[in-house]
Image: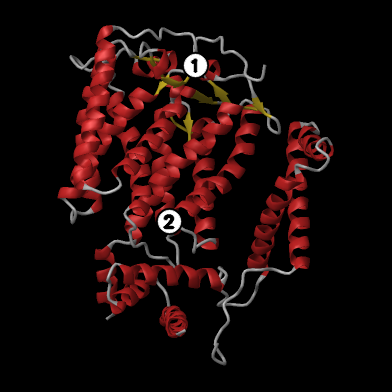
């Protein structure tokens, strides 16, 4: 048999949905359909926008699967381990509605102001979403995440205080991912740049990587690194620095060599270039115990390894997923800064 | 085509160049495989690569050859970039830059942006030189003339 049956706890959990959960799922479907119907009156290609956000969320859910559990949604509701497509639809709707409404009614607002508004609205909605899944007994947290959460829960909401960090970071990455592809969907006019701003782009990539690394810290232990390099638990500037430099250089290499590529082609090229460098490095770090995956992550592994590097196949998939979120959200901000009309006017005035 | 007009590069490379790129690519891959093996104190990767070709009677070369050529082309380009000593040499193949500019100008025109605004954008924000921008505009206009002439000719027929 090609596929090994999954026997770990990651597969054998309570999948039976109670009445309240079934109603909750019906509520999600109805809200998604209604949102799609009404938003289709406000903007074009709504289904495509929905799919892009859903892909961003699914990538995130797949990547962070060991950190939290989604139980009791029904046998049919799961795609991979306890990653559920029903929740993906729920989160997608929750993000799509405020983003489309803000874009529609504040078309001329500055992008950073709009982004703060997206985050604000989505954050409030996500708090309620998280409260609902926790209250219904769908959502619980992995032991490694609980170690960080340390029983510090927000009163009444019953969600961890750590969610106040997780939710904005999660939303920043997913909205950034969507906004990158919305440049393509909306056929935005993006200027080819003769000179790249290396310093600025490094800061953007650094922020994206560090914010995400702090969030996913419970999944993996970065060991045997110099003690001065750890700045938060086991998140090390040396380890994060490696990913930052690889991503930053890959993005610039592609932007320089393939300046004529379309956004989608460039995106694929970023992932391929960064992935080709990252995968062997990750394999070496795992083999030499610099990176030790936590028990919840190991439980999720199917047992298959990538032949060349002996890396769990899940890690090989997780690398492009990680890169996709980081690169898309970083590149979105790079494009926004590059095409900033105010900066252009200033430069024009100065040169005159 | 008018005399003196630049012919756009076809993008096709000579067979010899292809062979060299592929060979260089294979060498780079082999070098990386050996390095990984040395670091891991084994011969797994090199062995896997060789056996994956032998055991499939070379079918895997369908994948390996284009990948090797791509890596080889990138590697050669990188070497050229590093070892070019002359100044004012553009890091990117001119054709790619020109394509990027032409695409931008075409899209700007579709979005009904005035050519003067497009030029200003490219100059002040994109950092492009006047000559490069003008060349891109010329290229578009020449192509448009060529297509218009052909269209008129087709219509007359």
Q: Image point 30% across, 47% down: which residue? A: A45
Farthest residue in the front direction?
B157
Farthest residue in the bottom direction?
B3
> Could you tell me how many numbered marks the image carries?
2
Residue tagged by mark 1?
A296
| Residue A50 image offset from top left, x and y in percent | 32, 38
Residue tagged by mark 2?
A199
Q: Chain of mark 2?
A: A
Q: Is there any visible trace of residue A157 in the rendered image?
A: yes
Q: Quadrant of the N terminus of chain A?
A: top right
Q: What kind of element bears circle 2?
A: helix
Q: Is there any visible trace of residue A290 in the rendered image?
A: no
Q: Residues within 10 Å of mark 2 (few under 14, many from 20)?
A: few
For residue A41, which quarter of the picture? top left
Q: Image point 68% across, 28% down: which residue? A: A310
Q: Image point 34% across, 62% down: which residue? A: A189
Residue in the foreground of this view, choosing between B110 and A349: B110
Q: Image point 77% across, 46% down: which residue? A: B30
Q: Which mark is residue A7?
A: none
Q: Chain of mark 1?
A: A
């Amino acid at each position: 048999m090609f596929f090994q049956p999954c026997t770990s706890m990651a597969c054998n959990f309570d999948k039976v949905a109670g009445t309240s959960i079934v109603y909750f799922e019906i509520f999600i479907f109805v809200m998604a359909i209604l949102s799609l119907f009404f938003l289709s009156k406000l903007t074009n290609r709504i289904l495509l926008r929905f799919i892009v956000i859903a892909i961003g969320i699914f990538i995130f859910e797949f990547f962070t699967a060991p950190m939290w559990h989604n139980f009791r949604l029904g046998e049919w509701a799961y795609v991979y381990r306890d990653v559920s497509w029903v929740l993906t639809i729920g989160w997608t709707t929750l993000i799509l509605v405020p983003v489309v409404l803000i874009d529609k009614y504040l078309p001329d607002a500055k992008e950073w102001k709009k982004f703060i508004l997206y985050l604000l609205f989505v954050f409030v909605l996500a708090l309620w979403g998280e409260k609902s899944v926790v209250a219904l007994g769908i959502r619980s947290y992995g032991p490694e995440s609980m170690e960080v959460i340390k029983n510090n829960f927000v009163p009444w909401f019953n969600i961890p205080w750590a969610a106040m960090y997780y939710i904005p970071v999660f939303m920043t990455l997913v909205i950034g991912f969507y906004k990158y592809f919305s440049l393509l969907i909306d056929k935005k006019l993006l200027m080819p740049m003769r000179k790249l701003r290396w310093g600025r782009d490094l800061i953007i990539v650094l922020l994206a990587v560090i914010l995400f690394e702090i969030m996913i810290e419970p999944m993996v232990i970065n060991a045997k690194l110099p003690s001065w390099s750890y700045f938060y638990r086991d998140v090390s500037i040396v380890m994060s620095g490696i990913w930052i430099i690889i991503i930053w250089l890959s993005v610039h290499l592609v932007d320089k060599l393939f300046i004529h590529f379309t956004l989608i082609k460039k995106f694929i090229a970023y992932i391929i270039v960064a992935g080709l460098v990252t995968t062997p490095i990750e394999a070496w770090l795992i083999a030499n115990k610099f990176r030790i995956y936590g028990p919840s992550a190991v439980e999720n592994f199917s047992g298959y390894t990538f032949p060349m590097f002996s890396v769990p196949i899940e890690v090989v998939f997780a690398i492009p997923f990680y890169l996709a979120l980081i690169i898309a959200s970083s590149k979105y901000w790079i494009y926004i800064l590059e095409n900033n009309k105010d900066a252009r006017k200033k430069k024009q005035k100065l040169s005159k | 085509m008018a005399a003196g007009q630049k012919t756009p590069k076809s993008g096709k490379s000579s067979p010899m160049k292809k062979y060299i790129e592929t060979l260089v690519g294979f060498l780079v891959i082999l070098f990386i495989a050996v390095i990984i093996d040395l670091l891991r104190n084994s011969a797994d990767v090199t062995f896997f690569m060789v056996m994956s070709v032998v055991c499939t009677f070379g079918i895997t070369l369908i994948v390996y050859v284009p990948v090797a050529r791509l890596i080889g082309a990138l590697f050669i380009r990188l070497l050229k970039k590093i070892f070019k000593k002359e100044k004012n040499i553009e890091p990117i193949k001119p054709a790619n830059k020109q394509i990027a500019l032409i695409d931008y100008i075409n899209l700007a025109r579709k979005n009904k942006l005035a050519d003067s605004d497009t030029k200003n954008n490219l100059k002040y924000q994109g950092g492009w030189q006047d000559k490069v921008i003008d060349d891109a505009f010329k290229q578009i206009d020449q192509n448009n003339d060529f297509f218009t002439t052909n269209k008129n000719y087709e219509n007359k027929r």
